[in-house]
Image: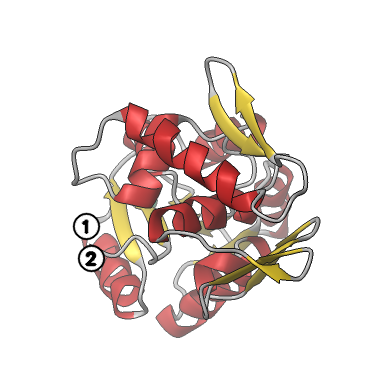
Amino acid sequence: MSTDQPTVLLVEDEPAQREVLSYNLEADGFRVTTAENGEEALLLVDEEAPDLIVLDWMLPNVSGIEVCRQLKTRPDTRGVPILMLSARSEEVDRVRGLETGADDYVIKPYSVIELMARVRALLRRTRPAALGQRLEYEDIVLDSETHRVTRDDKPLKLGPTEFRLLSTFMEKPGRVWSREQLLDRVWGRDIYVDTRTVDVHIGRLRKALCQHGGGDPLRTVRGAGYALG
Ligand code: CA
């Protein structure tokens, strides 16, 4: 499996809608994981660390609005962009959706083409690395198209795993990633790898980042994981 594909979590309780959207997102190059209700969505966010969430407003039990509110108050999920889908078209609901923290809002019935355009625009704004662009953090520059990394303009030698780790960190500087989230994201969740493997590769990444000098930009957060800066 390719772990370079951006992951979209699609939360929609209507099977037909879920199927159409999954199909189109996959055709557009996304890895899609689906949830039928709010509880499942909240669990999958932890397991999958998605790049973006497409969230239906009207869900059984825990509503889309409540899922959105919870995710936007948690420090580890606050930065994940959320696109809300809703059949409600009143302006007041739109405002409420955005106040809850949704990053964008699409009214049903929507055109699939428009929805795909909004997904890509939202990712471009919030997760540029997911779409293959240049990321910068202080003196470190990572180009996810050419797979080149420089620090203070000097090229860095990085293994493929270290590259994916760094790319994950550089998408969201400051975000704390648990070892499990890094495993899912960098190795893929279908592969069995011990969490200590993460520590080994973090060690290699640290060494690689400092190969021409400079301080260690990675932070170990005791009991939680790792963060850049
Ligand atoms: Ca619904």
Tag in front: 2 or 1? 2
Q: Secondary structure at mark 1?
A: helix
- Residue 85: image tag: none
- Tell me which amino acid carries mark 2: Glu
Looking at the image, is 17 positioned above or below residue 196? below
Q: Nearer the viewer, residue 48 or 190?
A: 190
**Does any atom of ligand 1 lie closer than 8 Å to the CB of label 2?**
no
- Tell me which amino acid carries mark 1: Pro
* Location of mark 2 (residue): 19
Q: How is the image coloured?
A: secondary structure
Q: Measuring 57% from the left and 38% from the top, which residue is drawn there?
A: 77
The reply, left or right, for residue 154 in relation to residue 116 is right
Q: Quadrant of the N terminus?
A: bottom left
Q: Nearer the viewer, residue 196 or 188?
A: 196
Q: Nearer the viewer, residue 227 or 99?
A: 227
- Residue 15: image tag: 1
